[in-house]
Amino acid sequence: MAAGAPRIFVSHLAGVAVFDPNGDQVGRLRDLVVMLRVGRRPPRLLGLVVELTTRRRIFLPMTRVTGIESGQIITTGVLNVRRFEQRPTERLVFGELLDRRVRLTETGEDVTVLDLAVHQLPARREWEVDKVFVRKGRAGTFRRSKGEALTVEWSAVSGFSLEEQGQGAESLLATFEQLRPADLANVLHHLSAKRRAEVAAALDDDRLADVLEQLPEDDQIEILGKLKEERAADVLEAMAPDDAADLLAELPEDEKERLLSLMQPDDAADMRRLMAYEERTAGGLMTTEPIVLRPDATIADALARVRNPDLSPALAAQVYVCRPPDETPTGKYLGTVHFQRLLRDPPYTLVSSILDDALQALAPGAPLPVVAGFFATYDMVAAPVVDEAGSLLGVVTVDDVLDHMLPDDWRETEFHLVDEGAPDGA
């Protein structure tokens, strides 16, 4: 369902078939998973519970849904087939929210929830529940009495929010929802070990992965050690490959191997490849997931890849042109195209015609001081790492360089923005 498309009432999705990009059915939708928020803010739609043809129920994140239309759901085709387990902050729409008794805040009348409507936020990949279809009447009698039915905004009813349910750690988590990962990591670091584990367990995999990347090493190991092994493997897969490899390298050998065996084979292969390099070298610092394009790709193709909201600004700053294969380690590395150059030429222009091929790439064994000097000399935010055969192995980003050059305890520092209107010293 594209941004700006009309909202969908969830009752129309019950039992709908789920297909991969090739048109093969992978299962049917059995429920929707939402996360309630503090106050009257609409809940976020996290994903779908899909029953596979084997009758196993799995979780499908909304980031893996490319279309909801004509009675079918289309996915990216990348599915995690581990059995769905509901987390403390998650609510099942069909199982827990429909047929629920809530109250209209304007009139104080008790009503029953018949349906909920979801929509995709404009220019974003997030989905929300924004409308509630309710019927007036006493519980248990509304269907026979045919009381008045109406559709209202989520904020027009009470009885859903976390404060009203007294959810403890869940309410705390929802309060921190708007924090950046680095700020939430700082909050987690200062919580008690018990509360830190509770909040970490309630975060979804992607959010927890983002937060783990910002935590000190000791906190990372502690949190990962308290997760079930299958979930720990999922979180490691969701982390940036270089950060996940650094964390795995700190674990005991037997634990590391168990987690690698639970990961998807391609992700595990990336981890093993990164752990083969010394930590403070270009190979140890790099991520294996840059934007790689073939020489016959156009600027339009490049910009479509750059628009991916999951990319960090540093990774989206440039694309790397290589001969096939397109994933690292690639075929021959041909050069880099900077984002600004993509904006200066027509969309149909081939990226191979606007290459920056004069800038020498980093060798995987280049030590940290050499890598830092490269960034300072050429004013780069990301740099390619190429082996002796000329294949692109990955990309080092400036944030990873800074992370390894700052003191070990730099994450303990509290940063404050300067208020220019404040008196001197304030």
Image: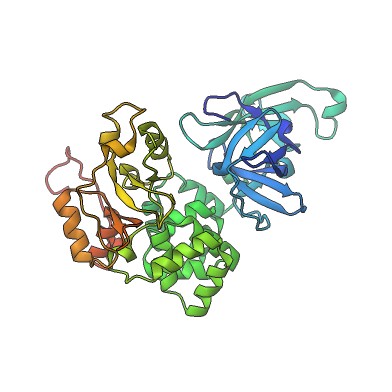
Which one is in front, 76 or 364? Answer: 364
Residue 275 appears left or right of 138:
left
Q: Is residue 201 above or below residue 181?
A: below
Residue 143, image x, y percentages: 84, 28
Residue 292, image x, y percentages: 39, 47
Direction right: furthest residue: 144
Direction left: furthest residue: 424
Residue 97 appears left or right of 202:
right
Residue 404 appears left or right of 288:
left
Point out the image quarter for the N terminus: top right
State the image quarter where residue 348 is shown: top left
Q: Report whether residue 133 is seen.
A: yes
Which one is in front, 68 or 109? Answer: 68
For the image shown, how many numbered marks are present on the structure?
0
Q: Is residue 109 above or below residue 376?
A: above
Q: Is residue 284 above or below residue 139?
A: below
User: How are the residues colored?
Assistant: rainbow
User: In percent of the image, x 47 and y 46: which residue is there?
Assistant: 177
User: In percent of the image, x 57 and y 62: which residue is there?
Assistant: 231
Residue 365, image x, y percentages: 27, 68
User: In percent of the image, x 30 and y 61: which residue is there?
Assistant: 411
Which one is in front, 412 or 422? Answer: 412
State the image quarter where residue 338 is shown: top left
Q: Report whether residue 109 is seen.
A: no
Which one is in front, 244 or 386? Answer: 386
